[in-house]
Image (tube, rainbow, N blue to C red):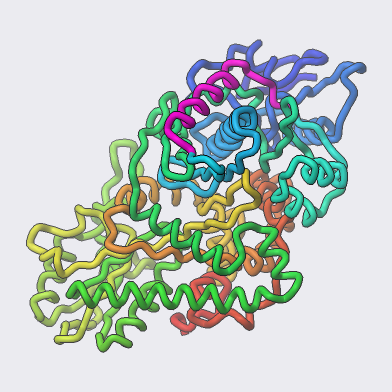
Amino acid sequence: MQILIDNIPVDVQTGESLLDIVRRTGLDSDSLKTRPIAADIAGEAFTLNYIPMRQKEQGDSITTFRMRKAIRKGGGEVKLIRYPESRGRAIYERTILYVFFLAMRELFSKVHTKVNYAVGPSLDISVDSELPFTPDDVETVRAKMREIVEADYPLIRRRLDIDEAIRFFERDGQEDKVRLLKWRQFTYFDVYEHGDYVDYFYGEMCPSTGYVNVFDLQHRPGGLFLLRPSDANPDVATRYVYMPNISKVFARSDRWGDLMHCRCVADLNDMVENGSIRELIRVNEALHERRFAEIATEIVNRGARAVLIAGPSSSGKTTSANRVATQLRVLGKTPILLSLDDYYIDRKYVKPDENGEIDYEHINMIDVAQFNVDLEALLNGERVEIPHFDFKTGSRQMLGRYVQLGDDAMLIIEGLHGLNPQLLTPRIDKRLIFKLYVSALTTLNLDDHNRIPSTDVRLLRRMVRDYETRGATIERTLGMWDSVKRGEQRWIFPYQESADEIMNTSLVYELAVLKKHIYPLLKAVESDSPCYDEVISTIKFLNYISDAAVEDEIPPTSILREFVGGNAFYR
């Protein structure tokens, strides 16, 4: 058999793995930035431990047949996955979490440990033990993790019958896995094991523990932060950054999860099955309404005259702006909604950069000078004509919309760069500006060792909205997503901590509703699609979630209505 691995033709030898081939062809590297950690074959991700041509004594497996089928479909072409890719970062995260939980198992076998969510560049992990978890304990864990990395244990999957897997996890006390697996739709379950530690992380892993040598740990009360490789330089761990505002929002969401008795997918599925999801929706929406009311009250108490709202894609910014406006009206204010998009400069004046490319999300695409002239005039009580940007013609137009702030009037301005310090000139009185950051910060977990990234939920929202309201295919949305994320990393996330308040727009019930919309569309994607791996990964994730036909329960002002339709603010 001959394959083409990163465009290098290679004759595959019987019994050698993809990893052997990578090393034999000189494609391995000591740098995480360039080191292959998995393989892309016909759009699917595969571990480098796969053996394309097994010897008789090695036996065969379903996974080997799947890889051979993929190699045939891809014409023998194998593309190597590295850390800088989004898939590569996810593979690395799963593997370093395996190393972490193995270290905890060997050091503190009776302690309950759970990965919660990403806080900036780090993963928040709670440690529930009778004795306080100390900084010295963190040092001990770090040393054990280094030992496991140095040992370079191979990470080989083993397939179990689903009932066998459930019985094992019951005996092992991993009740979270037991509850989740009872919702699994297949008769088998793949695990990784080392000694008496058996676990699974939902997706491909690095070939061995030696691959995840870039990490750090930071103690916090009740647990720690696991620091991932730096995006700028993956060969060093990211620096710990204290993010009190984001941490406070996650803590509030944790309390909400406890209040609603919904902290993991199994909790949500139980509620779908017994019908209590309808009450869950009512409580969750009431908590959102209360939070919007609190934010509006703070805006008024601070004496702000303008609210700047920013957030990543599919966070529900438009609905949030309207709900804040509604709450401000309750407090006697007259909100006026504006968009930063209307201050885009005419496309004919946009010049490509030195690479011949145009970054339409750059703050230089905004006519910052004119925006500040208009904002200053409005804050001074003057009457101002507000421009309208026509995206079809790529030009700004004046259509006779005049705005003037009366005594009780207040501006609500939504836009990508709302938190960017370059947006406001020194002439603007910052005491009159309130900055609101809006994001869907998911706290629902698959199980204690597998978090659901907020980015994945926002992508589901966007796929549903793009299809329902814009007629866009799944492939089109996925094809733009990496560019969207790059823009967020550059223009949104660096400024999230500077917000006066943060609104978490995630809803613990939304996955059960989104699945009903998106699952048939995902299943219809053909295997030759360039985004097939992302689609398959999403399908596997959604297979654990029960869908719910409860849209009659969702209020027309809900954040979720921005994506599934029926939003009162768009009528």
Q: In which quarter of the image is the N terminus?
A: top right
User: Front-most of 228 and 179?
Assistant: 179
207 vs 128: above or below: above
Q: Quadrant of residue 135?
A: top left
Asked if the magenta segment contains residue 155, the reply would be yes
32 vs 524: above or below: above
Asked if the magenta segment contains residue 359, the reply would be no
20 vs 324: above or below: above
195 vs 401: above or below: above
Of all residues, the one furthest to the front in this rendering is: 131
On the picture, is 234 further left or further right than 555?
A: left
Type of secondary structure dominating the magenta stretch: helix
User: Front-most of 452 and 493?
Assistant: 452
Where does the magenta region start and end?
Answer: 133-156
Q: Quadrant of residue 335?
A: bottom left
Give the image location of residue 520, x and y in percent. Answer: 72, 63
Give the image location of residue 18, x and y in percent. Answer: 70, 21
On the picture, is 37 further left or further right than 426?
A: right
Give the residue displayed 44% in from the left and 24% down from the top: 235
Give the image location of residue 218, x and y in percent. Answer: 42, 35
Give the residue displayed 42% in from the left and 37% down from the top: 219
